[in-house]
């Protein structure tokens, strides 16, 4: 358990949007032509670099590994496989193909945006949250206004239908009252005729 804690402290965590300058000079027995395959937990997801990718930075030969590439190989301890050819007369083609694997002290952390003390201040994070919240509120306000317009249109159509229905009911009431009056008048005539 103590060994794990010591190793974890030595690991350099590579947070989202961070890059690595992989020092080529640390590689032993390297020739002019070589291939390095970087991976984390799955060797099938590798990042392939060659001698053509080497640049000089601050007097050191490095291979830059940018975040877009590192993200593709996933979270975990960064490992690599080096393949290079050494001249050797003992073999038919006069070459010895050499391959070895190593583990770096880098740990890829794609689920963490930034190392807090390095990348963004609390003020910048709060400003970003405020910006996103303001955009969401503007969008929500637009949707609410749209809904209110739709509800207003439904209210107008409902009011028109109720007005028409009330008019129809009033018309029916008038016709019914006239029919009842007419019926009453006829009954009175029939009674008068019978009484004669």
Image (cartoon, rainbow, N blue to C red):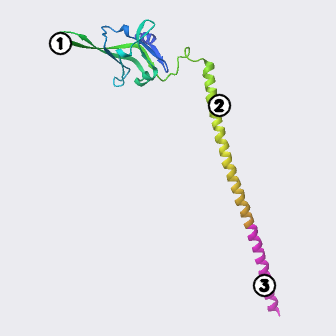
Check if mark 3's residue and mark 2's residue have beta carbons within 8 Å. Answer: no
Magenta stretch: give its range: 169-196
* Relative image position of residue 39 (x, y in whole percent): 37, 20
- The residue tagged with tag 3: helix, strand or loop? helix
The answer to which of marks 3 and 2 sits earlier in the sequence is 2
The quadrant where residue 56 appears: top left
Position above or below: 15 against 163: above
**For mark 2, does the 10 Å Cα neighbourhood hold few (<14), some (14 to 19), or many (20 or more) residues?**
few
Position above or below: 75 against 24: below
- The residue tagged with tag 2: helix, strand or loop? helix
Q: Residue at x 32, y 8 (%)?
A: 28
* Front position in the image: 51 or 130: 51
- The residue tagged with tag 1: helix, strand or loop? loop
- Mark sitting on residue 91: 1
Q: Which residue is mark 2?
A: 134
Q: Which residue is mark 3?
A: 186
Label 3 or label 2, whichever lies nearer to me, is 2
Q: Is residue 9 left or right of residue 39?
A: right
Mark 3 to mark 1 CA distance (whole Å): 130 Å
* Relative image position of residue 176 (x, y in whole percent): 75, 74
- Mark sitting on residue 79: none
**Chief SS of the magenta region:** helix
The quadrant where residue 131 appears: top right
Mark 3 to mark 2 CA distance (whole Å): 77 Å
The answer to which of marks 1 and 2 sits earlier in the sequence is 1
């Amino acid at each position: 358990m103590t060994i794990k804690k010591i190793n974890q402290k030595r690991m350099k965590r590579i947070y989202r949007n961070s890059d690595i300058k992989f020092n080529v000079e640390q590689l032993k027995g390297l020739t002019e032509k070589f291939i390095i395959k970087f991976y984390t937990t799955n060797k099938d997801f590798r990042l392939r670099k060659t001698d053509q990718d080497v640049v000089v930075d601050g007097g050191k030969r490095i291979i830059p590994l940018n975040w877009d590439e590192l993200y593709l190989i996933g979270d975990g301890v960064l490992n690599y496989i080096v393949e290079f050819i050494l001249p050797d007369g003992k073999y038919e083609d006069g070459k010895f193909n050499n391959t070895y694997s190593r583990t770096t002290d880098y740990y890829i952390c794609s689920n963490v945006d930034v190392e807090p003390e390095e990348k963004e201040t609390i003020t910048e994070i709060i400003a970003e949250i405020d910006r996103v919240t303001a955009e969401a509120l503007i969008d929500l306000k637009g949707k609410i206004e749209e809904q209110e317009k739709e509800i207003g249109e439904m209210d107008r159509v409902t009011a028109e239908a109720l007005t028409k229905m009330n008019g129809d009911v009033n018309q029916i009431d008038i016709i019914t009252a006239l029919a009842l009056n007419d019926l009453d008048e006829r009954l009175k005539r029939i009674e008068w005729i019978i009484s004669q």
